[in-house]
């Protein structure tokens, strides 16, 4: 009996395997159980808008907490020090704005972000957004699968290679998501959120015990490893990770793009009221910021114990991404190791949400316009097929992509290409479809010039000097540690600048087109009027409203009057708005202070 109990299978003890299998059984039972509640598109894609505060907090925590993030932050922190935390603290300075964004998204009363582009700018921008969103979601699924697969490969000592692990993870969780949609994803996320919180924190003291305590970590690592911003002279010349330039540029990029990330509409729109939407979006993400600190310190500890593993590797970046899995294998005891691997899989279940969101984008923003008038059951079936196809595409990208780090940066840059169209679209009447198109095309051009290497013989050699000149201003002002931060800032400046200039030079949309849209943003959820009190409007104006209608004149006083001279529609902020927003900034300062204190 003892020989069997001490045996090893795929690098794991029997108790580890029992824990993992038990976890799989529990979450799959939950997924199939809640699938019985799914009867309509809104049930599948938005959970019937029934989620409360705690469920939305956990849903946001797990939707925004992916297995590859722990893998990447741990690896980056081992390479460049605590500055590696900014790969996923790039959203830290955006988080207070979530308190204000949450009600805006909930008031839109649509199912997908593509619906927003339809009702604000028309069908063409909806289609463009759909293409960008599907590309982003495929990248996101690939990141999740590759990151978790690498971690499991490290945790099992290579007994389960990365690619078989990717396929296994995909098969295990695709089944109940295809059945239950966002409902199954949210309920299992609540369970997984608790596990991720506990075990991410437990990994740090377990690692400290292995290396002899925090004093040994400080003694064996250079002092620059404990700075919250990496020093340019201590990082490779071909990277900019963790530097001040990195922090500023990716923080701006994150704020511009987070509002058009496809899963944001689904996660926030699933709240029962505006309060649930803002609490879930803001504070679910604050919990994640706290967890990211645990991953960063795990990276510092791993840099001490496993330095020989990645420093001598041909590709140190890829090798360092194996450190999180190695830490699981070496630091955690039997049973706990299995539970931590189950938590890695828990992070992969965020791919469920991306599958569901991708299915929603395809079904509503591609398929329905081509095949209108079908029954709900037909569209639901198409959505389930589409979610499975998204997973297949994600697996393919995960197999052939490079490092997780490269995928993360590429995905954030891609989705931010339409950030200006959203931000200006929700507050400025002058923003119009022509300007949105020009802004998108201009930002794509700058992004390609600065990011993409033209193939030899393509006749595009002239692009290289143009790309170099994009950072000339930064060089003259000595604002750059590396080229990429300034290129990102220029891309954002071009995107917003072109949007504003073209909007001012072209004809604004009529009030008949815009009043129904801004009526959504000025009407609190729950204050809608019965449909019978309003005349029938165009389908676009009433998209997602069901049996209610909105009247702009009835809520016009909910916006500040003075900015309307400049075509700005800014909702009046309440005590709850200001209090939550300022309180969130206090939390931002508290988290940074806590990181500095813990590193001292």
Image (cartoon, rainbow, N blue to C red):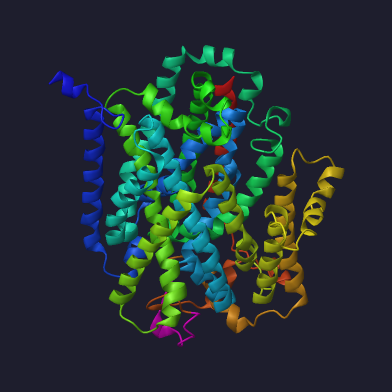
Q: Quadrant of the N terminus?
A: top left
Q: Is residue 208 left or right of residue 176?
A: right
Is the residue 71 above or below the residue 449 in the image? above
User: Which residue reaches farthest bottom?
Assistant: 535
Residue 78, picture quadrant: top right
Looking at the picture, tell me which residue is in the foreground, 229 or 430: 229
The residue drawn where x is 68% and y is 35% is 243
Q: Judge whether residue 2 is colored magenta.
A: no
Q: Is residue 64 left or right of residue 484?
A: left
Is the residue 359 above or below the residue 434 in the image? above
Looking at the picture, tell me which residue is in the foreground, 70 or 566: 70
Looking at the rendered structure, the number of numbered marks drawn on it comes to 0
Is the residue 211 above or below the residue 501 in the image? above
Q: Judge whether residue 527 is colored magenta.
A: yes
Residue 278 shows in the view: no
Prevailing secondary structure of the magenta residues: loop
User: Which residue reaches farthest left?
Assistant: 1
Q: Percent position (x, y) of residue 314?
A: 58, 32
Looking at the picture, tell me which residue is in the foreground, 511 or 30: 30
The residue drawn where x is 72% and y is 54% is 450
The residue drawn where x is 66% and y is 66% is 440
Is the residue 334 above or below the residue 31 in the image? above
Q: Percent position (x, y) of residue 200?
A: 41, 32
Q: Quadrant of the C terminus?
A: top right
- Magenta residues (range): 526-541
């Amino acid at each position: 009996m003892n020989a069997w109990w001490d045996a090893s299978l795929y690098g794991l003890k029997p108790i580890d395997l029992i824990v993992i299998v038990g976890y799989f059984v529990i979450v799959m039972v939950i997924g199939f159980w809640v699938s019985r509640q799914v009867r309509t598109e809104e049930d599948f894609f938005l959970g019937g808008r029934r989620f409360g505060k705690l469920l939305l907090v956990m849903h946001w925590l797990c939707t925004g907490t992916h297995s590859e993030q722990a893998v990447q932050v741990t690896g980056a922190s081992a390479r460049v020090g605590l500055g590696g935390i900014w790969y996923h603290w790039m959203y830290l300075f955006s988080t207070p704005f979530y308190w204000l964004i949450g009600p805006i998204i909930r008031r839109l009363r649509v199912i997908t972000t593509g619906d927003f582009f339809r009702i604000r700018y028309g069908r063409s921008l909806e289609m463009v957004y759909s293409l960008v969103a599907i590309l982003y979601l495929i990248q996101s699924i690939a990141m999740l699968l590759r990151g978790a697969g690498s971690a499991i490969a490290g945790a099992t000592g290579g007994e389960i290679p990365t690619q078989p692990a990717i396929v296994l993870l995909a098969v295990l969780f695709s089944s109940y998501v295809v059945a239950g949609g966002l409902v199954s994803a949210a309920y299992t996320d609540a369970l997984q959120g608790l596990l991720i919180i506990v075990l991410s924190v437990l990994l740090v003291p377990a690692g400290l015990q292995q290396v002899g305590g925090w004093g040994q970590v400080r003694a064996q690592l250079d002092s620059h490893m404990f700075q919250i911003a990496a020093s340019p002279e201590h990082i490779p010349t071909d990277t900019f990770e963790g530097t001040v330039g990195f922090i500023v540029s990716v923080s701006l990029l994150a704020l511009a793009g987070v509002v058009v990330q496809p899963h944001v509409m689904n996660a926030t729109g699933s709240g029962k009221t505006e309060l649930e939407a803002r609490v879930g979006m803001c504070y679910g993400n604050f919990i994640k910021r706290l967890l990211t600190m645990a991953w960063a310190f795990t990276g510092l500890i791993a840099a001490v114990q496993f330095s020989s593993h990645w420093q001598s590797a041909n590709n140190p970046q890829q090798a360092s991404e194996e450190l999180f899995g190695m830490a699981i294998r070496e630091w955690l005891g039997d049973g706990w190791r299995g539970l931590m691997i189950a938590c890695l899989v828990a992070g992969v279940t965020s791919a469920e949400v991306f599958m569901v969101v991708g299915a929603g984008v395809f079904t509503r923003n591609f398929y329905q316009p081509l095949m209108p008038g079908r029954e709900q059951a037909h569209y639901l079936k198409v959505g389930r097929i589409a979610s499975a196809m998204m997973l297949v595409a994600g697996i393919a990208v995960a197999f052939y992509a490079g490092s997780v780090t490269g995928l993360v940066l590429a995905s954030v840059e891609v989705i931010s290409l339409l950030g200006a169209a959203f931000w200006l679209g929700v507050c400025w009447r002058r923003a119009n479809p022509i300007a949105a198109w020009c802004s998108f095309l201009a930002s794509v051009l700058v992004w390609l010039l600065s990011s993409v290497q033209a193939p030899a013989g393509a006749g595009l050699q002239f692009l290289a000097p143009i790309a170099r000149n994009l950072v000339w201003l930064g060089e003259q002002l000595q604002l750059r540690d590396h080229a990429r931060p300034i290129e990102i800032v220029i891309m954002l400046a071009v995107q917003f600048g072109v949007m504003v200039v073209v909007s001012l030079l072209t004809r604004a949309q009529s009030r008949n087109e815009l009043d129904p849209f801004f009526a959504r943003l000025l009407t609190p959820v729950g204050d809608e009027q019965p449909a019978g009190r309003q005349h029938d409007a165009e389908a676009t104006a009433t998209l997602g409203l069901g049996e209610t209608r909105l009247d702009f004149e009835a809520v016009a006083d909910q916006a500040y009057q003075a900015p309307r001279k400049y075509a700005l529609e800014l909702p009046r902020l309440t005590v709850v708005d200001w209090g939550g927003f300022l309180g969130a900034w206090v939390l931002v300062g508290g988290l940074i202070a806590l990181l500095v204190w813990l590193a001292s």
